[in-house]
Image (cartoon, rainbow, N blue to C red):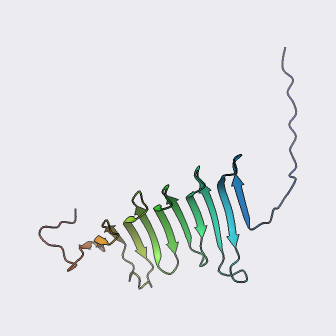
Amino acid sequence: MAKKRLKRRRKKLCIDVVETREIVLVDEFGISRATVSCSGGNGGKGGFTLIQINDDNGRPRIELQVDEHGNPCVRLNTPNDGCGVSMAVNDGRGNGLSIGDFEGKPCIMLGVPHPNSQDPPGLHPHITLLDERSRRGWTAFHGEYELPGNGKPTEDNSAT
């Protein structure tokens, strides 16, 4: 005996538009799992937008945001609220990628400065490795590299 197929009907949306400044999704235990929020800043200028996904403890682990200057950023956070990986575009300074250790301290930074930037100057991509105190340990840029101290490589130090 053949099963009778039910006709599917298109469901109508109950609500076409929802306007709010923040939506917080919680699980059945009341733990915040995700947030979508925004702020209009000063009269609609200088606001931000944030999408955040949390772990089992309600800590933000993934963040997508546009800051008050319109610059986008993606962050993947460590369990202790440190930044594990961050990618950002800054219209005035340039683009960057930062990779942190398990505590969130920066270890590796990649950057492409904006052509008019003075921090760092010029349009030369660079990679910087940081020491355990988050100080610059080694930097490569524009086909060259430098070490801390006198800034020049020595025979005992290599770029590889």
Q: Nearer the viewer, residue 75 or 92?
A: 75
Q: Is residue 3 above or below residue 129?
A: above
Coordinates of residue 130 in the picture (x, y in percent): 32, 68
Q: Is residue 20 above or below residue 30?
A: below
Q: Nearer the viewer, residue 130 or 117?
A: 130
Q: Residue at x 40, y 71 (%)?
A: 111
Q: Residue at x 59, y 49 (%)?
A: 56
Residue 2 sits in quarter: top right
Left or right placement of residue 82 versus residue 68 in this view: left
For the C terminus, the quadrant is bottom left
Residue 54 sits in quarter: bottom right
Coordinates of residue 119 in the picture (x, y in percent): 41, 82
Left or right placement of residue 46 versus residue 12 in this view: left
For the N terminus, the quadrant is top right
Coordinates of residue 74 in the picture (x, y in percent): 53, 63
Coordinates of residue 75 in the picture (x, y in percent): 52, 62
Q: Going by the picture, which residue comes out furthest to the left? A: 155
Q: Going by the picture, which residue comes out furthest to the top? A: 1
Q: Is residue 4 above or below residue 149?
A: above
Q: Residue at x 47, y 62 (%)?
A: 82
Q: Residue at x 86, y 56 (%)?
A: 15
Left or right placement of residue 16 versus residue 146 in this view: right
